[in-house]
Image (spheres, rainbow, N blue to C red):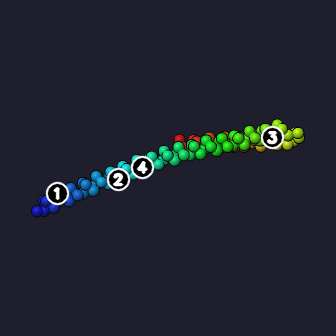
Amino acid sequence: MTEDMGAAASEAATSAADASEAAVQRIRELTERFIEAAKKAGNVSLDAYERSLQTLVEFEERAAGASQLDWVATIAAAHAKFVQDVSTAYISAAREMLK
């Protein structure tokens, strides 16, 4: 009788361990899928941000070219260059982190 109880307890422990391992594996898979989805969403967001900033820079460059005042054109061109340089560095760093 004690052998039957020992075998049943051993079987229950093995079954619980198998169930735990299966649950851990499912959690790992879900976590990996979540991370990949987050990376894809991050890259999509960065693409949209980059396009928006490029549109802004192009507008500022056109405004600088259309200005009749040299100092206004110079400031607008400098600001456009600054925005482009900073955004390029930011986007590059963010993409590197998403790898």
Q: Find numbered disc 4 in the image and state the secondary structure of the residue it sits on.
A: helix
Can you tell which quarter of the image residue 3 is in?
bottom left
**Of label 3 and label 1, which has the lower sequence position?**
1
Residue 35, disc: none
**Seen in the image, is 62 located left or right of residue 17?**
right
Question: Mark 3 against mark 1, which lies toward the viewer?
Answer: 3
User: Mark 3 highlights which residue?
Assistant: 63
User: Mark 4 highlights which residue?
Assistant: 30
Quick one: 73 or 2, which is closer to the camera?
73
Classify 10 Å Cα crowding around label 1: few (below 14), some (14-19), many (20 and above).
few
Question: Could you say where residue 52 lies in the image, as x and y percent from the top left?
Answer: 67, 43
**Of label 3 and label 2, which has the lower sequence position?**
2
User: Mark 1 highlights which residue?
Assistant: 7
**Of label 4 and label 2, which has the lower sequence position?**
2
Question: Mark 2 against mark 1, which lies toward the viewer?
Answer: 2
Residue at 66% in and 41% down: 51
Classify 10 Å Cα crowding around label 4: few (below 14), some (14-19), many (20 and above).
few
Disc 3 from disc 4: Cα separation: 49 Å
Q: Amino acid at mark 1?
A: Ala
Classify 10 Å Cα crowding around label 3: few (below 14), some (14-19), many (20 and above).
some
